[in-house]
Image: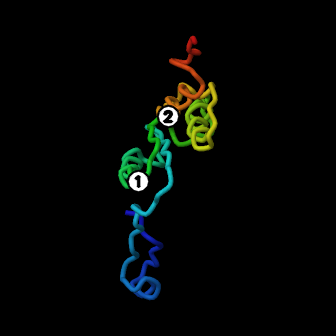
Amino acid sequence: MFHRLDYESEKGNLEVYGTSSPPDYDMSLIDFPIAILAGEKDLLADPKDVEWTYEQLKHTTVFYYMYYLGHMSFAIAKDMSWFTVDTMAILNHYNGICDESTIDSKFEVGNEHCRNELGLYGGKFMQE
């Protein structure tokens, strides 16, 4: 679980929280859309920990994808399509924007919505 700050002494925790250990945060209270973009090769944010976090936030997660990237690849990878396509598709969707450049993202909910709004099917304009 995610806990509050541990004062590393029973006395400190007792003074602040009234218990010998810090209380957990109630993750069920989070009620805004969350996107989780993670890397299979990430040595800092271990994929097992990311999966655990996803399980805790599943009720509010709108996008979860494990890319074949390491930790620093999210900042300096040669292929930044995770950002220019997928992340932008998510941001556009939640800001009411449809853009053809993100129509084939991994964010399927946004893709379907924008294809309908833009009159696209499979990336091509529908014939009237």
Q: How is the image coloured?
A: rainbow
Q: Which three-letter amino acid code belongs to the residue tagged 1? A: Leu
Q: Is residue 121 left or right of residue 10?
A: right
Tell me the element at label 2.
loop
Relative to 28, residue 110 above or below: above
Depth check, front residue: 115 or 46 = 115
Comes first in the chain, label 2 or label 1: 1
Give how far across and how far down residue 33 sits, in percent.
50, 50
Where is residue 124, by image quadrant? top right
Q: Which residue does the image show at 51% across and 38% down from the upper left?
A: 70
Relative to 14, residue 23 above or below: above
Depth check, front residue: 21 or 8 = 21
* Residue receiving disc 2: 107
Q: Which residue does the image show at 56% across and 30% down from the upper left?
A: 114
Tell me the element at label 1.
helix
Give how far across and how far down residue 11 sits, in percent.
42, 88
The numbered dot on residue 57 is 1
Could you tell me which quadrant the C terminus lies in? top right
Depth check, front residue: 81 or 110 = 110
Relative to 123, residue 36 above or below: below
Circle 2 Cα neighbour tier, 10 Å, few/some/many (<14 / 14–19 / ≥20): many
Q: Which residue does the image show at 52% across and 30% down from the upper left?
A: 111
